[in-house]
Image (cartoon, rainbow, N blue to C red):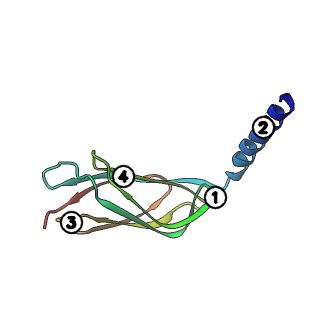
Amino acid sequence: MKARASIVFALSLCVGACAALALTSRDFQFVVAGTVRDSRGQAISGVAVRLKLKDIAYKGTEAVKDDQVQTDEAGSFAFGYIVRERHNEFELTFQKAGYAERVVSGSAPPAARFMVTMIAN
């Protein structure tokens, strides 16, 4: 039992060390976040927020160029990845029934924070 615990500990240590090595000095954190509100300033939950990246980003070991989340009860959304180059260009599309679609663009890192207002149809 003691030998098995030692093996498990050694494997855990190796996995942690390997994960730490995956992030190199050339990697950057890519964070795009924000809040979606209506024209009265009220948070809008359930907005589909789609991110399209010009270059590849990484979510763990998975390569990502397109991702989607929904806003929470506070109207907040966030995307977080690792990228190899600074200034990765992106486009965000905001959609919800009853509101006009919004599209905004930018580049990150550094982190980008958006306050988006959606207008009711």
Secondary structure beneath dot 4 equals strand
Mark 4 is on which residue type? Answer: Phe
Image position, residue 110 (x, y; %): 49, 53
Image position, residue 90 (x, y; %): 44, 66
Marks 4/2: CA–CA distance: 37 Å
Q: Which mark is residue 6?
A: none
Dot in front, 4 or 2 = 2
Total tally of numbered discs in the picture: 4
The numbered mark, 1 or 3, whose residue comes first in the sequence reads 1
Mark 3 is on which residue type? Answer: Ala
Marks 2/1: CA–CA distance: 23 Å
* Residue picked out by circle 1: 61
Label pair 4/2, CB-CB below 8 angstroms:
no
The numbered mark, 4 or 2, whose residue comes first in the sequence reads 2
Dot in front, 4 or 3 = 3
Label pair 4/3, CB-CB below 8 angstroms:
no
Question: Residue lying furthest front in this view?
Answer: 1
* Residue picked out by circle 2: 8
Q: Which mark is residue 97?
A: 3
Sort mark 2 into few (<14), some (14-19) or many (20+) by Cα contacts within 10 Å: few
In depth, the one of 6 and 96 nearer the eye is 6
* Residue picked out by circle 4: 77
